[in-house]
């Protein structure tokens, strides 16, 4: 069985590790986008992204994704799991992955109590019917936070940048020397109708403070990243396209 090629992928695929007995015979390869930075495969590809950043797993998709995450991590060193933010499509499999691998969970300081008490995740989302109904379906169980991340912390060779707005404790990860940025949901790069790349703001229905999120986006654009990795949508290597999109956001 082979996986169909995706027109969106330009990164270098790495060979999948050998499958173990009793598990599915096919383990898809992660996609490498920079030194020590891999994007895990998903279906649809790029819809809900998980990254291996050095020895740190960044985000864990929904509660239905733990098998595909654990399969793809086989053969790789993973010493910690960090979140960009505590929303159901990012922390859904955090507990299962941390338990299976015996690794600690880290997240932004202001989101830590929501990771430890997922009822707060729903309470802190905008008061919309969609959030009350969907969030509990995709979100995962509670898990203790071993490290509360703050501005300037080092994680997997990247530096933490506090980027509140989509959630109170949203953080991004920045590597200065090759200007690689993982920005979670500050900006997305997907059209949810076609699943094709399209830069867009985080949807207001899921964003606690849209104005503050735009401030975070402007701060990230000022870095002029050479590679931007999103929570949703394929990575983008076009610095100017990203910077110009953010510059057009309303103030
Ligand atoms: Zn998301």
Image: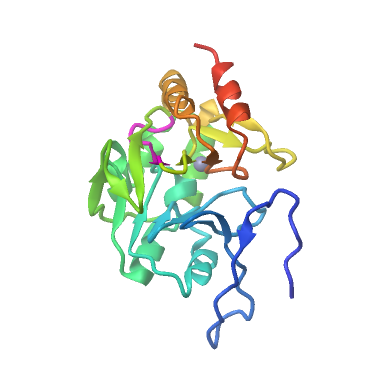
* Residue 117 visible: no
Question: Going 38% across and 65% down the picture, which residue do you hit?
Answer: 78
Q: Is residue 22 above or below residue 203?
A: below
- The picture places residue 160, in percent across and down from the top left corner, at 33, 40
Closest to the observer: 158 or 136?
A: 158
Question: Going 55% across and 59% down the picture, which residue do you hit?
Answer: 40
Question: Going 53% across and 68% down the picture, which residue do you hit?
Answer: 72
- The picture places residue 23, in percent across and down from the top left corner, at 56, 81
How many discs mark residues in the rendered view?
0
Tell me, yes or no, whether the highlighted magenta stretch contains residue 18.
no
Q: Horizontally, is 107 left or right of 49 in the view?
A: left
Q: Is residue 101 above or below residue 226?
A: below
Would you identify the image quadrant in which residue 125 lies? Answer: top left
- The picture places residue 152, in percent across and down from the top left corner, at 27, 38
Closest to the observer: 158 or 114?
A: 158
Tell me, yes or no, whether the highlighted magenta stretch contains residue 169.
yes
- The picture places residue 20, in percent across and down from the top left corner, at 53, 84
Closest to the observer: 149 or 133?
A: 149
Residue positioned most to the front: 177
Question: Going 46% across and 55% down the picture, which residue do you hit?
Answer: 60
Q: Quadrant of the N terminus?
A: bottom right
Residue positioned most to the bottom: 21
* Residue 49 visible: yes
* Range of residues picked out in magenta: 166-176
């Amino acid at each position: 069985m082979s996986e169909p090629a995706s027109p969106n992928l330009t990164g270098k695929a790495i060979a999948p590790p050998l499958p173990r007995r009793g598990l599915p015979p096919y383990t898809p390869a992660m996609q490498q986008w920079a030194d020590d930075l891999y994007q895990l495969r998903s279906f649809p590809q790029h819809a809900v992204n998980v990254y291996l950043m050095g020895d740190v797993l960044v985000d864990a998709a929904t509660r239905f994704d733990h098998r595909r995450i654990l399969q793809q991590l086989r053969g790789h060193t993973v010493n910690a799991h960090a979140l960009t933010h505590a929303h159901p499509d990012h922390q859904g499999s955090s507990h299962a992955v941390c338990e299976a691998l015996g690794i600690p969970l880290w997240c932004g300081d202001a989101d830590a109590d929501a990771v430890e008490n997922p009822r707060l995740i729903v309470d802190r989302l905008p008061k919309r019917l969609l959030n009350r109904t969907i969030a509990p379906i995709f979100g995962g169980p509670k898990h203790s936070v071993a490290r509360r991340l703050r501005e300037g912390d080092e994680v997997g060779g990247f530096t933490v940048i506090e980027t509140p707005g989509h959630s109170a404790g949203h953080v991004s990860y920045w590597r200065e020397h090759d200007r690689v940025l993982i920005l979670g949901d500050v900006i997305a790069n997907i059209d949810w109708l076609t699943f094709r790349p399209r830069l867009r703001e985080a949807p207001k229905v899921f964003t606690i403070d849209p104005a503050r999120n735009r401030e975070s986006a402007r701060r990230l654009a000022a870095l002029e990243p050479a590679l931007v990795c999103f929570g949703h949508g394929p990575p983008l290597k076009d610095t100017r396209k990203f910077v110009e999109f953010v510059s057009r956001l309303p103030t």
